Amino acid sequence: MRKEIITQSDPKSPISEVFRALRTNIQFMNKASDCQTILTTSTVQAEGKSWISANLATAFAQSGSKTLIIDADMRKPRQHKIFQMNNVPGLSNYLSEINDLGRRQKIDGMNCVKQTEVENLYLLPSGNIPPNPSELLMSDKIIELIDEVTKNFDVVIFDGAPCLLVTDSTIISRLVDSTILVTSYKYTKIDDLKEAKKRIKRVGGNIAGVVLNRVEISNKKYEEKYYYASTSNTPSLQTERRVRKTNRNYEDNDSENDEKIKNVFEKNSKEEIHGIKKQDTKVDEYINEKIKDTQRQIQDEIRSTKFKSKVEVPSDKAKEILDSIKKYKD
């Protein structure tokens, strides 16, 4: 199974949470009326309807519902590629009663159903690409198939063809309980969406809602909004890149600092220190200034004593300060 099934490969991701929210919305939206069969379609191709269908079906299966996804796009099928399964026999073989070898044969629709790697999720692939998909979907056998699968599955999701290009999805929309229109951000035209809605309504289809796919959003907003989902011990690819970059910067800085320290020690080892050596860094300049202040304090303390003669040894406090300075310099 490919990584396109994000709800299975990374169930704690923000995207998986969005599909669970979509599943919940569909369930509550149609609570009054039974919503067992769902059609996902789009206005034109490349809007992500097959990806939405696969992940939505996985979300239903993860909730414990026995779910079937039917690849009803018999022109450019994708579900067998997403789940990495054989495409024949499938829907077209059942409807046309022609097997994958091209011979006339009555085929049981349930025998075409295949179990996926996801628990509770099954797939009815599209089968061989027929020359007349619309005519096959208008036959009575599609009604027989829906009656049969609704007896064996809790949820049935049809992945239909784009409804503005062909009439396949429009035909199916009048047979299912609800239809979901998948649109793509900055790609789907509003006039196309209105026309798709009009066509489905014209044949008596029920539109449950519209899914806006490929919305641009930053990772920071995802982390802020879905911080509950960030419980996986496995870091994301972006996190790993940031960590590697940070470590690399630290290593570079450490190497530069080590080289600087080495040069300072080599320079100091070659110089003779007489008294208080002038330092280059700001910290050492501060220490040198403190030494001068201490010397002035010692002289002031000596002058303030009752002894008028020169005092060789300073007071204990001043002596302690000088010893500390001497240890620092050593």
Image (cartoon, rainbow, N blue to C red):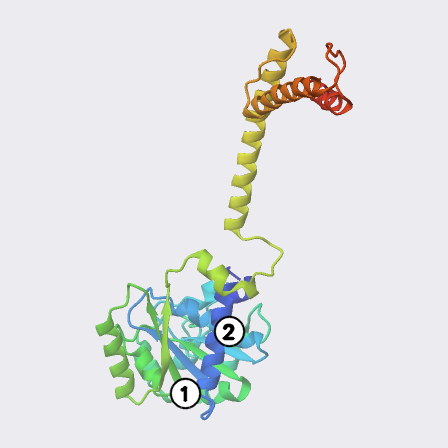
Q: Residue at x 59, y 17 (%)?
A: 264
Residue 320, percent from left and from top: 75, 23
Task: Looking at the picture, tell me which residue is in the foreground, 67 or 312.
Answer: 312
The three-letter code of the residue at mark 2 reads: Arg
Residue under numbered circle 1? 177
How far apart, in angstroms, are the residues tagged by discs 2 and 1?
20 Å
Q: Determine the secondary structure under disc 2.
A: helix
Question: Vertically, is 71 above or below 315?
Answer: below
State how many labels appear.
Answer: 2
Q: Residue at left 74%, top 10%? A: 309
User: Depth check: 137 or 3 in front?
Assistant: 3
Q: Looking at the image, which residue sits at the far left?
A: 191
Front-most of residues 205 and 31: 31
Which of the pair 171/4 is nearer the observer? 4
Reading the image, the residue beneath label 2 is 20
Q: Name which residue type carries label 1.
A: Asp
- Looking at the rendered structure, the secondary structure element under dot 1 is loop
Query: Local crowd at mark 2 within 10 Å, few (<14), some, or many (≥20)?
Result: many
* Residue occupying the point 65% across, 7% down: 274
Q: Position of 155 compared to 208: left or right?
A: right
Q: Are marks 2 and 1 in contact (CB under 8 Å)?
A: no
Residue 233 in which image quadrant? bottom right
Residue 173 appears left or right of 318:
left
**Residue 243: percent from the left, percent from the top?**
55, 44
Left or right: 181 with respect to 330? left
Residue 309 in view of the camera: yes
